[in-house]
Structures are given as C-alpha cells and as structure tokens.
Amino acid sequence: PPRTGKKQRVASSGEQGQDSDLSLVSFPAGTYVGCFSDDGQERTLKGAVFYDLRKMTVSHCQDACAERSYVYAGLEAGAECYCGNRLPAMSVRPEECNLECKGEKGSVCGAVGRLSVYRVDELQLGSRKRRTATYRGCFRLPENITHAFADSLAQANVTVETCSGFCSQKEFPLAVLRGWKCYCAYPTPQFSLRDAMDSSLCGQDPEAQRLADYCEVYQTPVQDTRCTDRRFLPNKSKVFVALSSFPGAGNTWARHLIEHATGFYTGSYYFDGTLYNKGFKGEKDHWRSRRTICVKTHESGRREIEMFDSAILLIRNPYRSLVAEFNRKCAGHLGYAADRNWKSKEWPDFVNSYSSWWSSHVLDWLKYGKRLLVVHYEELRRSLVPTLRQMVAFLNVSVSEERLLCVENNKEGSFRRRGRRPHDPEPFTPEMKDLINGYIRTVDKALRDHNWTGLPREYVPR
C-alpha cells in the first residue's frame, strides 16, 4: 500500500474498475452552455458514455459526469450521455437541440448529431461521492521523463488529491508523484505499468524521493480516452465474423475489449437493452447489417454456424461459466443469485442441462466453423495485450501499441458484479463434478484433434 503519515501523501479510496449504477440522485441543474455539433468522430466529450432509452434526464447525465470528475455533460439524441473536460469545437443554433429527454418531459437532450452541453456543478453533500484516485504502485521512472510525461505541476506539499485533480482536469488517466512534483501521463510502451517495484522504494521522505529513480502512480477518476471513440464500419464488411461463446464465458467483456481496441462497434444476434444502455450501440443494429466488426452469438446449430465466414470462439472454464450464467439468469448482468436459488432444485437442473450445452457448443463450432480463432477467457485475463493483439489481427484491423495499452488501462469496463457473493462460489456436488469433468475431457480432446492447444489445466478442480 502507499505510504501515509504526517508529511506524506494519503491515498484516497478508489473504485477503479467498479461501475456506478448511475442511479438518479438529487443533483442541482448545471449551467447550460449551449448546443454543439457532434459528428461522432474524434468527439471531445468522450470520457464516459452511457445511454438510457427510457429514463435519460439532464441530472442523470450530470451526476454521472460529476462523479467521474468531468466538467461538462453533453446529452444527445434524447437518450445518450457524454462527459469531458473540453467543449466541442463547433457551436450551432440553440433550436437545433430539439429532442426531449426520454425520461423528463420538457427538458432538452440534444438531437441527432447535436449535443446539449451543461457545465457540471459541484456534487452536493449527501449525494453520491466523487470518485477518487486509486494507488497503482511504485514504478521506476522512464528514461526520458519529459517525453513520457505530458504535463507537470510543481508546488510545495503537493498531495495525491491535488495531483489527481490537476491531471483529471487535463483528462489524463495517470497521476505520477515524485518528491514534490506531479506529472500526468498515459500508459505507453516506455511506461506500461507492467513492472511494479517494492512500495518501500517510493516510501521515503519526499525530498529523498526527489533524488531517487522511482515514482508513485495513481489512477485518476477519468478514463483513458485514447481508445473510447467508436463507430460503425464505414463500408459493409465483406467477412461476416462471429464472436461465439457459451453464456457466462465473458462475451460482453470481450466485446468491450474488441470495440475499444478496433474503434468499431460489435453487433449481437440478440437485442439486449441493458447492454445498449451501457454503450454497446451495435446492440440495436440488425445483426446481419455487416456494419459491426463482429457479432455476438451463443448459438451452436449447424445452420447458425455456417452463416458466418469466420469466428472467434471464446471458451471459459465451465465451472466459472455455469456460476456466471446462473447469476445472470437469477440477478441480471451485474448481480448475484440469492442463497435460495442455489439451494433450490433450479441449480442442479441448470447444471445438468447447461453443462452438456457448454460441451456441444465448442464441439459444433469446431466441426462446422469455417475459420476459427480459439481464445481462452483465462488467457485473455492473464495476458490481455498479446491475446487481444491476436484477436485484432484475426479481425484484420491494425492497431497501435498505445491503443492496446489504453484498452488495458480501461480493461474492466462496467462488467464487475456487485453485491454479496454466495457463501460457496462453486456449489458443485461430487456428481456434478463427475459430469462436468467428463465434458471437459471431451472438449480437450476435440481441441487437440483440431490442432488447437488443449484446455488450460485449471479447468479440472484438483
């Protein structure tokens, strides 16, 4: 942990990787700035994005932006909210923002390609707390500090809060402290945050630290915006690509990574309004439009597989997948099933039917898929950038290393479950384990027979 004490900086508790539920709270109206053009390319308000097709209000958007330390909140097309610290370049006539907010009669939420922009006022006491800086670790300074760190602030007694606030204002995701100097940065190949040092190396008196080769790094509340711009494909895709997985295997998270890495929306065989509201704009697009970089599917019949020219086949440990999908069925994308669900007959019935589907899903795609890339969820978690690099190459998109590091910095997205976990995270009986382990062996053999690496050893509980 970072050092604390009298002359020392105190790290605030952070929520990095935790998504706010963006629920409505009492929030004063911000100052209306005006109506601006927004072409969706290189938008300036791109720090946080969410949609709400039914309940969007001005205060809903403002609160979400204020919580993340953004200065401006922009509302578009009646249901879309964007945050940032710089105003869009082109203002237009006020009457061009003429769409009513979906959740608030009489209030204006921009129009198509038009943003109603508000300057966000301070959060009132008693409403949701502003997000704060999160300690990332102690790191060796890069060789060329001026090249690696884009902005800096030097003042006596600089604190984590001062530095994080300064860097947030300038939309940098990292606040770096060395002695009494504060630097703002992005993760880059020269400063990738891969090799954390022992925290004690940064725990000296600030004056001594100023002479050392180490620095403390904090994640600011703002997003790394180098990879948040996304759009539909400019021309219809000639290759129709599936992102196929068994439910509960991390398909939504993989879509988040692919969209931020490639800059293009992903589509879906299904329409899920919850995912659309989380910023997956391709969710509303017809799955056969070919305007998206790949299409989510859980289907596994021959006809459904042969419709696609190629597929990324995402496989996850069935023990984890079954628990994740049961949680989703009982409590939605971000909740946990209650104890009564696990103790009812519903759980063993679910395991019996779904574990065979986990196996047949992989076997069918190996049999009927025309061109496959097999990706293990666990490998994507463990080795994100190299695995994502393979996926992006398979999708025939070229991506800079900086963009991939930006994705890594934003990797969690909004997909962490909230609430209390069940007492037993793997409530499997010996009979269930025998059944599932048989399917694991079948799938492992099929992968090897098709010249793929077998399943990770951790799939079978030991």
Image: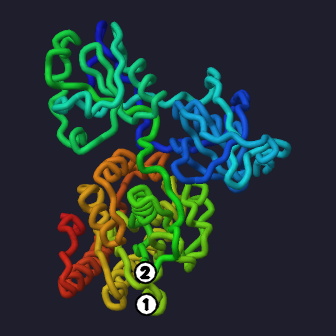
Residue 343 visible? The answer is no
Residue ID for mark 1? 306
Q: Residues within 10 Å of mark 1 (few under 14, many from 20)?
A: some
Q: Is residue 387 left or right of residue 311?
A: left
Q: Which mark is residue 280?
A: none
Q: Secondary structure at mark 1?
A: helix
Task: Where is residue 5? Give x, y as percent.
Answer: 29, 11
Residue 256 visible? The answer is yes
Write the residue at 47% across / 92% down.
Answer: 303
Q: Residues within 10 Å of mark 2 (few under 14, many from 20)?
A: some
Residue type at the position of mark 2:
Val
> Taking 186 as reference, is 456 above or below it?
below
Q: Quadrant of the N terminus?
A: top left
Q: Is residue 132 left or right of residue 181?
A: right
> Taking 301 as reference, is 23 above or below it?
above
- Residue depth check, mark 2 versus mark 1: number of the one nearer the observer: 2
Which of these two is toward me, 256 or 182? Answer: 182
Write the residue at 74% across / 46% down.
Answer: 109
Q: Quadrant of the C terminus?
A: bottom left
Give the mark nearest the N terminus, 2 or 1. 2
Q: Which mark is residue 239?
A: 2
Write the residue at 46% across / 30% down.
Answer: 170
Q: Is residue 73 left or right of residue 197?
A: right
The colour scheme applied to this rendered structure is rainbow
Task: Where is residue 325? Give x, y as percent.
Answer: 46, 66
Q: Is residue 102 left or right of residue 334?
A: right
Which of these two is toward me, 221 or 398? Answer: 398
Residue type at the position of mark 1:
Glu
Task: Where is residue 401? Give x, y as percent.
Answer: 28, 52
Task: Where is residue 245? Give x, y as percent.
Answer: 40, 73
